[in-house]
Amino acid sequence: MPGRANGTVLDTISRSAAAAAAAAPEDCSIDVEAVQRYASSLNVSQVQEAGVPTRLPVRFESVQQEVNFLATMHLLDFGSGYDPQLLQTMRRDARETLQFGVLGMHISDKKIDAQFMKEFSNFAVANYFGIQSHIDQQVQPGITMSRPGPLLQLTQQIRQALNSTGAALEDAGSADLGSLIMSSLESRRASGQAPSASSLVEYLTTAIPVFADEANWRGQQVVFQRKAQLLAFALYQRFAPELPDLFGFVDAEQLTADSGNVVPAALHRLGILKYSNELEQAIAAQQPLTPGSDQEVALRAAAINAVAQIVQATGQALTGPQLSIYLQHYLESTTQIQAPGKGVKHLAPGSLAY
């Protein structure tokens, strides 16, 4: 982990994002005056209230089972690059589709454990998530043939993500993600160390490759660890009041912004992120960006850095994850009333990060 000797993984994420954002102003730059104006306009209480999670109407038999459920949800929090196809065929975006699938696993009383994940198939993807990898095409009157459809790659990515995670859990000697996480937290408590989001993020991204989220960009390593950070924040929100000795992460305020495609779009709509003409036209036209490319990494890094600057301008009254949730609500509530091209989410099909 680059820079790990000089701080925690959360320090590394902030530092590498700031360096990448500073190195790529030609693709995506931050309007410092817009940052200050926006920070001054924020109602801190409203932002904090927007970040309070909504509990799903789901029953769990134990803390470990709920942790396992939340971890599986965040493990599979990707596929936004296929939102146009998903919305056209299923009327749900990737986040709704994957939430629907994991809820289906839980409601069907399936044990979402290492064996279940290792044996997950393309058929299971269709069964739980409703995603069809193939489409029927008429080759001549009365005759149709099944052919690979636009969602085949997403189907394969979901299956492979679960298969590889099942294998990683077996290698770690853990029955499921819940037991892996609880063992890590309990081990830290037993050693007399305070619960730490950074420690959990580093452990998850090392033990479970699907959680790892880094890019080798212009000769430097840029670290994001988006899904692991969002999971750490979700666990902190859900369990810290009840189990502070396990989930009361003393460094929770150091978690960074959501570096998927929602926060950059919201910041662009607010005039805080400025895109190059080339990048703005590509995003407006919904032309896919290659995961790990210069422009894709620059967008994600700039979002983390811009949110950090806004948080700093509020006197640390907010955290990166809180502001990320607020920005998501803002983007959703203003999509229909803004000028075309402003606040469009970029697409990066193939990314396992978002």
Image (cartoon, grey):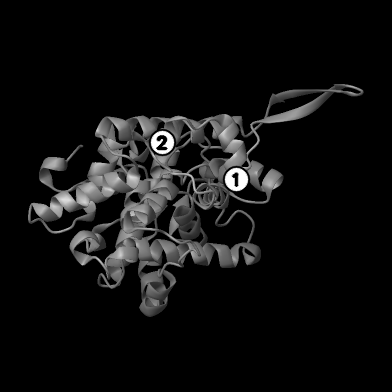
Please say if 347 is above or below 254. Answer: above
Please say if 203 is above or below 56. Answer: above
Q: Nearer the viewer, residue 83 or 16?
A: 83
- The residue lying furthest to the right in this view is 141
Q: Which of the labelled discs sits on residue 347, or is there none?
A: none
Left or right: 335 in relation to 115? right
Which residue shows up at 56% across the image and 63% down it? 332
Which residue shows up at 18% across the image and 52% down it? 186
Q: Quadrant of the N terminus?
A: top left
Quadrant of res 243: bottom left
Q: Residues within 10 Å of mark 1 (few under 14, many from 20)?
A: many
Q: Residues within 10 Å of mark 2 (few under 14, many from 20)?
A: some
Mark positioned earlier in the residue sequence (2 or 1):
1
For disc 2, the marked residue is: 294
Mark 2–mark 1 contact, CB under 8 Å? no
Q: Amino acid at mark 1?
A: Asp
Q: Nearer the viewer, mark 2 or mark 1?
A: 1
Give the alpha-carbon distance from disc 2 to disc 1, as whole Å: 22 Å
Q: Amino acid at mark 2?
A: Asp
Quadrant of res 152: top right
For disc 1, the marked residue is: 83
